Image (cartoon, grey):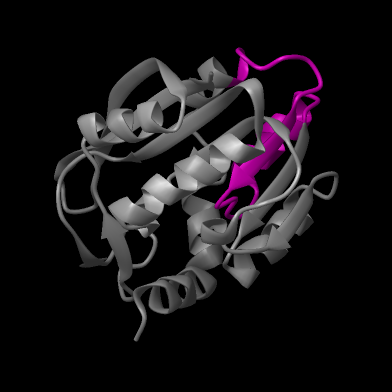
Amino acid sequence: MDRIIQTIDTYNKTAEEFEHRFGDLSLYRAKLEEFIAMLPPGARVLDLGCGPGNVAKLLTEKGYSVHGIDLSEKMVELARKNVPSAQFDVADVRELEGHLYDAVFCSFILPSLTHEEADTLVGKVREVLLEGGLLYLSCMSGTGSGFETTSFSPNNPIWVNYYQKSDLVGVLNKHQFSVLKSSYQDYPEPDGRITQDMFIYARAT
């Protein structure tokens, strides 16, 4: 089975568990709040891989206009219920096109993409960002890729790709972004291991 088809099938099956585990944003709220503080008033924001609308909810509560897209129909269904004031569509980020935005969130969407697809996506993001627009990237730090079970899908694997900071900085520079800040945060795995999440804030130049 195609890796994307299998991964989206898992997200559809486990959307409610994902919402339960990550809906309150407690693990990442500090990073998100830090980035959101950089946004101009009334910013129009694109939320790629919006999931159940957890990031969109935070943004709309702060007065921002949000358009979220996700390839999981179940995730979009939950997002529409959770954040009725935002716009959500079932769409593939690999085919991104459309309006111009002040900011784009790529919150843990890169792990579903190959390095080549991530490169292409960053290029497409630059095309839909206004000059000086902001980009939020988060992913898992490491090397390698493959199918894994997760804390929200212990019986249904998803395909996961890991990234090094140097790889992403190179891609961002290639597509005319300047990196404003990068940081790491520990993530406690269900089996007791500690892995690292990576966060990058960038500006379109």
- For the point 39% across and 55% down, the residue is 117
Residue 24 appears in the picture as rendered? no
Furthest residue to the right?
A: 85
| For residue 105, side relative to residue 2 (left or right) | right
Q: Residue at x 23, y 39 (%)?
A: 141
Seen in the picture, residue 49 relative to 55 is either above or below; the reply is: below
In the image: residue 80, left or right of residue 35:
right
Locate residue 186, reporting x and y percent.
Answer: 25, 31
**Residue closer to the observer: 165 or 117:** 117
Task: Name the one closer to the observer, 83 or 136.
Answer: 136
| Residue 156 coordinates in the image, percent (x, y) | 34, 75
Q: Nearer the viewer, residue 204 or 155?
A: 204
Q: Mark yes or no: residue 131 visible.
A: yes
Span colored in magenta? 36-64
Residue 123 appears left or right of 127? left
Find residue 114 and report its image quarter.
bottom left
Residue shown at 81%/25% (left/top)? 63
Residue 133 on image: x %, y %: 62, 23
> How many numbered dots are placed on residues in this image?
0
Task: Kindly indicate the quadrant of the structure image that contains residue 147.
Answer: bottom left
The residue furthest bottom is 1
Image quarter (top left, top right, bottom left or bottom right) of the N terminus: bottom left
Magenta run includes residue 74: no
Q: Residue at x 44, y 34 (%)?
A: 137
Confirm whether the magenta stretch covers residue 39. yes
- The front one of 161 and 83 is 161
Q: Position of residue 197 (x, y in %)?
A: 29, 36
